Amino acid sequence: MTPVISFSGVGLTYPGPPPVRALRDASVTVRPGEYVTVVGPSGSGKSTFLNVAGLLDRPTEGVYELDGVDVSRLRERQRAALRGQRIGFVFQSFHLLPYRTATENVALARLYAGVPRRQRATTAVEALDRVGLAHRRDALPLVLSGGERQRVAIARALAQRPSLLLCDEPTGNLDSATAENLLELLDQLCGDGLTLVVITHDRQVAARGQRTLTIRDGVLDE
Amino acid sequence: MSKGSRPSLRDLLGEALAGLAQRPARSVLTMLGTVLGTGAFVAILGLTATAAGQIDSRFTALTATEVTVEDIGGADPADTAASFPPDAAARIAGLNGVRHAGVYWPVPLSAPRFAAAPGAAADQDELTLVAAEPSALAAARPTLRAGRLYDRFHAGRGENVAVLGAAAAGRLGITRLDGHPAVFVNGTPYTVLGIIGDVQRLPDLLLSVIIPTGTALRAYQPPHEQRAKMLIETRLGAAALVASQAALALRPDAPGRFRVIAPPDPQSLRAGVTGDLNSLFLLLASISLVIGAVGIANTSLVAVLERTNEIGLRRCLGARPMHIAAQFLTESTALGLLGGLVGGSVAVAAVVGTAVLRDWTAVLAPWTVAAAPAIGAGVGLVAGVYPALRAAWIEPAAALRR
């Protein structure tokens, strides 16, 4: 089976002065349906790993294949399209548009893929059902609790029908009970066959994954 | 391989408008400069056009071709001799550009009695007896209701003929001419040749019994208290020239015995209204447009910085830099367009309101009104370029920073 993520010798050096080697010689494979967590202290290169994996930054060395496609060679507009179609992002601070309802926020996911409005709304409603927020469809983010907001954000990522859910500290802004709820949702999604990469500095969160990668000073270890 | 992402135009427009609608107060304040600028632009053009139109309506072809020469006599008030020479009409008719010219005066009779039958006592104090040359009648542009005007034959022979104004005929009870009616002035009969239904100049003639000057000079005294006047109809555009030559042509020896009343010069009149004022206000309008543009640019830039997260998120969702730029450019253009629409509407209301208050006819060239939203949109578009570029340059990774 084609791996979802395949890093071989991937590195990223931010041009100086002085040049910073934020990620060096990373080789890792994430297979479909896997639940992988990435841990490391702040400044270790977690964000760089996320940016490279999420097609937000181009690696300066090595080869990155997403679903078997060498993405380092792609043009920027193709990378943007891939980002919109293959990768679902979940952020620590949710990044919901404050003036849009939950459904509208989720529907935004398919906007740049050129999906017609009505179909976007249907997909959004389905995604909200899937994260257990069917009753909060028309709520504005302002009246949602932190946990609910993160679920809306996950629904938005799911609406993209991604091959990979890339979560950056998904529980970072949540209290422990809510965080536990959210982690259960992630387990459930993984059980449905979704590939998950969760970046965290929380050992307990990291323990939920089937595999844990550790990153330290830009070096990735299994 | 997947295609490049391409949302529909309608979706991009929807995103941009949603961005505006989410912050209505800010949008309105941002629009204000554009509203003022386009509003001032339309209002100025509308008001000057309305004022100019007002001048146009007062200044018709009729007044533009009318010159009046008044006999003001000499310096000595005891000098009551008529200033017009006997051949006054011929002298003026010889000038270039004159159509008709003739002398007329109210016949100096104290309390004349008018009647349609001899001896019939009639109370007709409102009627006047006017002596007028046939060419003066022609210059008044009469419309005949019945019969005909008298001509140079009647005037030369001093025939006892008269033409009645419509109102005078009504008072005297003369409506038909088949019986060759006569009007009696202090008992003297004058055969009524015609009835004038309406005149375009000298409306007093409608309340008058008009007789030829030759007849008047034979039967009555020459004018002394109310002096004679001359009505000249000129070709269009010749009035100023005729007016400058008339006094000298009439009496080369004493041109000072006349006052010549010429129509106002239309060009100088209109120039007075539109000239300096217009350009000054248009300059002010442009300044407020520039201020409006700066306002939009400023607000858009702030919005871009404020919405860095949103921009990053959209990039993560597959938006290309072009989409981001298009969204912000659409937002600022829509703001400008809206400002232009509001400004244009307010200005139209102001112009119409002013016209109503002053009893004027509002004149607004359609292109000035249509230009307002276009100018507003243009201002918004130009103002939005830099913020849109800034937005497009934002790295998607920005969304991941907290």
Image: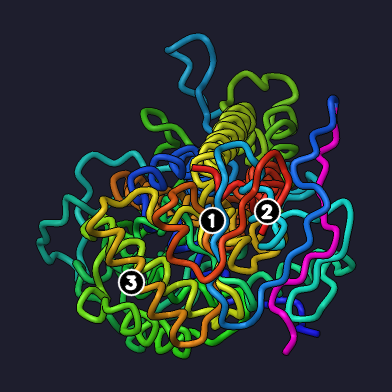
Q: x%, y% of residue B350?
A: 37, 47
Q: In this view, does B385 lie to the left or right of A125?
A: right
Q: Which mark is residue B281?
A: none
Q: Which residue does the numbered mark 1 point to in the structure image?
A: A199
The residue type indicated by label 2 comes to Phe
The residue type indicated by label 3 comes to Glu
- Label 3 element class: helix
Q: Residue A184 carries which label?
A: 3
Label 2 and label 1: CA atoms lie apart by: 9 Å
Task: Relative to B264, say whether B12 is above or below.
Answer: below
Q: Which residue does the numbered mark 2 point to in the structure image?
A: A49
Label 2 and label 3: CA atoms lie apart by: 25 Å
Colouring style: rainbow
Task: Relative to A135, say whether A167 is above or below.
Answer: above
Residue pushed farthest top? B76
Which chain contains the residue that carries disc 1?
A
Q: x%, y% of residue B128?
A: 29, 50
- Label 1 element class: strand
Answer whether labels 2 and 1 touch (C-beta < 8 Å): yes
Is most of the magenta stretch helix, strand or loop? Answer: strand
- Depth order, front residue of B75/A37: A37
- Depth order, front residue of B164/A140: A140
Can the viewer see residue A83? yes
Query: What segment carries the magenta color?
Result: A1-16
Q: In this view, does B297 lie to the left or right of B227?
A: right
- Reply yes or no: does residue A14 show up in magenta: yes
- Report the residue at 73% width, 65% height from top: A28
- Reply yes or no: does residue B2 show up in magenta: no
